Amino acid sequence: MDQKHPLQPGEAAPAFSLPAANHEGRVSLADLRGRPFLIGFFRGLHCPFCRRQVLRLGEVQPALQAAGIDTVAVINTPVERASLYFRYRPTPVMLLSDPDCLTHQAFGVPRAEFLPEGSTDSPRWPYLASMAEFEAARINPTGELPEPMNPMAANPVLNAKDGFAMTQADEAILASHPTQLAGHFLIDAQGIVSWVQIEAMDGPNSISLFPTAADIIAATGGLRH
């Protein structure tokens, strides 16, 4: 299936309207226009690395706020589930819910699709992958795993470490969107993309390597207010 490529600097952010998980009502691009904002797109709560990155965004949010930049995280989780989870783990980041990944797709954040077994087609990561390529990947982006592990094997290890219990909603999101990648976009006050970082564009061994606080702060240097 053809997928839209990630938006690039100089392109306009697409219109969206999503329910907020830690605020009342919905939030749209029109609501955010007039101030620059950082928007991150993540997998569902089943992904411990995405949960950690949302916390990281919360840590950098005061510096961004001081620079006049809002911070938004779009999570591939039903709003009721996200609201419950973050009620006990509050963050200053504005959290939006997109259980269908429609906004991820509008911004062009890739999702991998696997070649059928026996296919003679060539993989085209991050859009088309072989199962062997994915299963051979080894990650340990936060250094918390006992050793580098396959991405899907790493999740339950860290979830157990966190005491995170998968709910039926989490299981359904994982089944529907298992290979959705993450992405970060810095949008200027006029709604134009200024900076982009897409997870694992160079291969599955980079899954869950996200921009650091220093990376994000550095990216704001070229932002047009």
Image: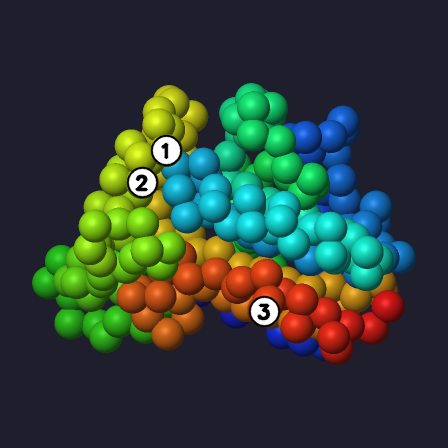
Q: In screen coordinates, is 36 left or right of 174?
A: right
Residue drawn at (81%, 56%) of the image: 66
Q: What whole-number distance in Å separates the C-alpha atoms at marks 1 and 2?
A: 6 Å
How many numbered marks, from 0 up?
3
Disc 1 target residue? 162
Disc 3 target residue? 215
Instruction: Specify the quadrant that holds the C terminus.
Output: bottom right
Q: Inspect the image, locate mark 1, and give the three-letter code of the amino acid beneath it.
A: Asp
Residue drawn at (20%, 65%) of the image: 133
Can I make out residue 81 in this image? Answer: yes
Q: Position of residue 160 (x, y in %)?
A: 29, 32
Q: Secondary structure at mark 1?
A: helix
Mark 1 burial class by Cα count in 10 Å: few <14, some 14-19, many 20+: few
Can I make out residue 193 in this image? Answer: no
Disc 2 target residue? 158
Q: Inspect the image, locate mark 2, and give the three-letter code of the amino acid beneath it.
A: Leu
Instruction: Specify the quadrant that holds the N terminus.
Output: bottom left
Q: Position of residue 149 (x, y in %)?
A: 21, 54
